[in-house]
Image (cartoon, coloured by chain):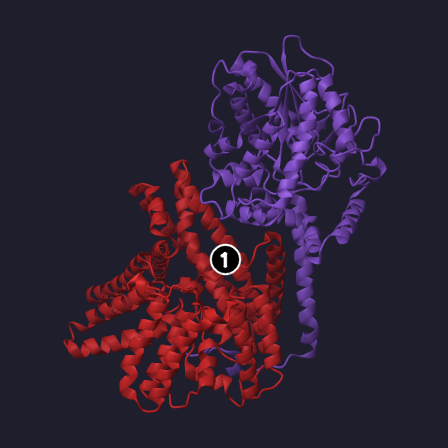
Amino acid sequence: MDTASFQFVFFGLVVALVSNLSRSPLWRSLVLFVATLYFLYVLAQNPIALLPLAGFLALGYLGVFLLQRGLKKSLVWFILAVIFAYIWLKKYTILPAGLFLHIPYFTLGMSYIFFRVLHLLIEVGEGTEQGTIGLGRYLLYTLNFLTFVSGPIQRYDDFAADQFAALPPSLGPGVVGLQLERIVRGFFKVNVLAMLFIAFQQDALVQVSQPLPAAFKMWAALRLALLYPIFLYCNFSGYIDVVIALARLMRLRLPENFDRPFAASSVLDFWNRWHMTLSNWLKTYVYNPLLITLMRRFPSTSVQPFLGVFCFFVTFFLIGVWHGRTSEFIVFGVLTGGGMSINKLWQLGLTRVMGRKGYRELAKNPIYVAFGRGLNFIWFAFTQFWFWGDWKQIDAVFSALSIAEWLGVWMAAWLGATGVLAFWEWLRGLLLSIRTSEGPVLLSRYARVVYASALGLAALVITILLNQPAPGIVYKAF
Amino acid sequence: MTRSNPSDPVKLKETRLSLRDWVLLPVLGLLTVCFLAVSMESIGNWVFPRNLADVRTCLDLTSPSTGARAIPNCRILAGLPEGRPVENEFNSCGHRSEMECGIRHSGAYRIVMIGGSLAYGLGVNREQTFAALLPKQLSLATGRNIELYNEGQLWGFGYGKITLNFHMRDVMAARPDLILWIISPSEIVSDGPAFVDIEGPKVNPKESSVPRTPRNLRELFWTNLKADLASKSASNTLRALLNKSRSVLLLRHLFYQSNSLYLKASLAGGNGELLSAGSSEKMQVRMQHLGVLAGDIEAQAKLANVPLVAVLVPHREQAALISGRGLPDGFDPFKLDDAIRAVLASHGAIPMDICRGFSSIPESEQYFFPVDGHPDAQGHAIISKLLAKELTSGVIPSLKAAHPTNSASSETR
């Protein structure tokens, strides 16, 4: 149930069906609440294991409750308390091990609840959120089974606007058809594409350490580097496709989390397209306040561009660190933040050398864009070594080839990614240019029915053939 | 923070579906499914053509006078669905051996090999099987004239006590200096002919569980479908139905090029139990059956004063586990080999180990047919080398190597 399995999709469809028996907000909320409780029960099995999570939620609600009662000065303390409780319950190694609870308890979904709780505290504390948030609404928002496991991180006002509206978003046959097609697409991504890509990546991981000729090992290293980002995209975005579509069938619109991230031609652009709800959350609640504070502290106009560079580093370092509790994720954070900062510095440097107009011209150049896209992809692939591997694996992989061989691998990866992504963009543009008066043929309902049927059949056959449980969603672990 | 789906169709004009679309869209979906299924099956048939020749045509599994055996001098071009058709030629005694039965070269050291489809060399030309390669390597290593007479049975080994007795009569008639028993994991895990009715002559050949050779593909399809429906759950029946299609064979063949994908799928099935690090009651029963069989064979070999050497030759999943890195949790590729050797030793046979030899061969699973699991020609060459190395290591004094044999890994790549 914590992945895009047949069971989860079936459960979601049944809940959507029951939810649509009435448009009344009370009925829809009741159905969502019962479904969420059942979902939690299935995942946790033991209600006792949910107690720490319940305590965390209670702390957050106490903060919201008091802030709504006008205790605005307590905002900072509640934010700090929630952050500490999160670090403590997630057993981050920055705290002494003796502090942790030594009983088995349930932490799945806590990261996403953490973001929602902080969002509520800040919005209520700053007076942006005007409506009263009762316990029921608070629990529905923070625990919603559709966004529980891996997001997307939705704003409370957006959630409330759909969930508690007397006239919720309409649901005609066209919308239903689109959502069913999206569920099939998401299911296919998770259960077929992601499963194949991770299998091929695992094969490469084995091969790179084996006593094979250098050419074989370099080929294995190339696959090892390039396949993981594609796997991760299929795994995460496929699940998000399923939950967004299921939510829409329940007349709830969730925010998009991906916008063709590998079409990005720079690291800065990439993070506007990848896990968008997380990066936007951090931009809203970390980057912007930090930048404003620093600009007030250092008002010099010559320094201000570099303050942005610094704030990018801090924000995206935090994104990296958020992903895990071990030292590998600190490196991942440094690389992610470093990539953003270097990209920003590159932009500043080129603008200074070429002027704004010159840089804008360059940024539109198709060859520059294509190579930038390839470079962004391999940079992301490089950072992912600290995302999927532990130090032992990383050491084994990097020591399997000489420095010259690795340079060759990354050069080939860059050129390969540039070529493949450029071809993909060209093909996509070409296919979308075939239009009728109603829009691109590829996006018509007829085309959607054709490829949804094809993907559905392929997913069914391959799932049965491979005889394996649905692969877990990587992002549920964070 | 990100706003909820700005491109959501709620903001677009919700167009009503016309009556035409209510009919057209489902028909379009159905046509797509049919087109895909037919085209995939056509591609599957093109890549792996259905071979109308069935090697079972050469088998007589129901003869009460001789037991199950191949029809003498039968010859047929047939093979595995994944491989090319190979010549299956039987001598006048119904054995796949290049030597005629009853003829023994003077002064030669004769090994008679017994076992199932692995010893038979299923899917591989006779001259490429380890049955053909091994005597040459042994002769080279020992400096002696060594010949091997292959009595491997395509339909599995140890098919009831009656057949076993008939078979051992043939083995002894070949006047062996050594009996080499090739055991495959599929014979251990099989609930089929390999170890059934081991306790006594209960099999009525006319009511045998081995199906009559179907006359044509349609008959084969319906016979198997009826059997599946009668004995399996709905999901297993669906899986069994899919397994019969060429498109599924093609997909499996492609997917199983990936070691990790293959291992996950394979270990989730029946073979997972065989390679599991834990022990189960079922496996203990299987080992008891193997012990009974080993006792019967060893008793007859001992009467004739012929040493019996037995060896487990791994199938693809075991080879993949052995030569891969990072074993999946709960599996031990050597446990089965150790258990079999212990059983064989307790019944007086001489157990040999070639499984550990696979650990020096990177990606040894690529030398097996991906879906079927039997070794291909390169796999047979590796097995032959490993067998030669073990047989000449001194375990059989008369085969002790004058020159040590090369390691099998030198054959690869």
Tell me: residue A242, above or below residue A191: below
Tell me if residue B68 can be seen.
no
Image spot of residue A266 (x, y percent): 33, 63
Chain whose colour in the figure is purple: B
Q: Residue at x 44, y 44 (%)?
A: A206
Q: Chain of mark 1?
A: A
> How many C-alpha atoms fall within 10 Å of the one at disc 1: few (<14), some, or many (≥20)?
many
Residue farthest toward the top in the current orientation of the protein:
B106
Q: Which residue is mark 1?
A: A194
Tell me: residue B366, above or below residue B244: above
Which quarter of the image is occupied by the N terminus of chain B?
bottom left
**Number of numbered discs overlaid on the protein picture:** 1
Classify residue B289 as left or right of residue A226: right
Image spot of residue A3 (x, y percent): 52, 64
Q: Secondary structure at mark 1?
A: helix
Tell me: residue B333, above or below residue B348: below
Image spot of residue B21 (x, y percent): 67, 75
Image spot of residue B10 (x, y percent): 52, 82
Q: Residue at x 50, y 38 (%)?
A: B322
In the foreground, B76 or A422: B76
Tell me if residue B328 can be seen.
yes
* Residue B326: quadrant of the picture: top left
Classify residue B129 as left or right of residue B335: right
Amino acid marked by disc 1: Ala
Q: Residue at x 38, y 50 (%)?
A: A413
Tell me: residue B329, above or below residue A350: above
Chain whose colour in the figure is red: A
* Residue A396: quadrant of the picture: top left
Classify residue A378 as left or right of residue A179: left
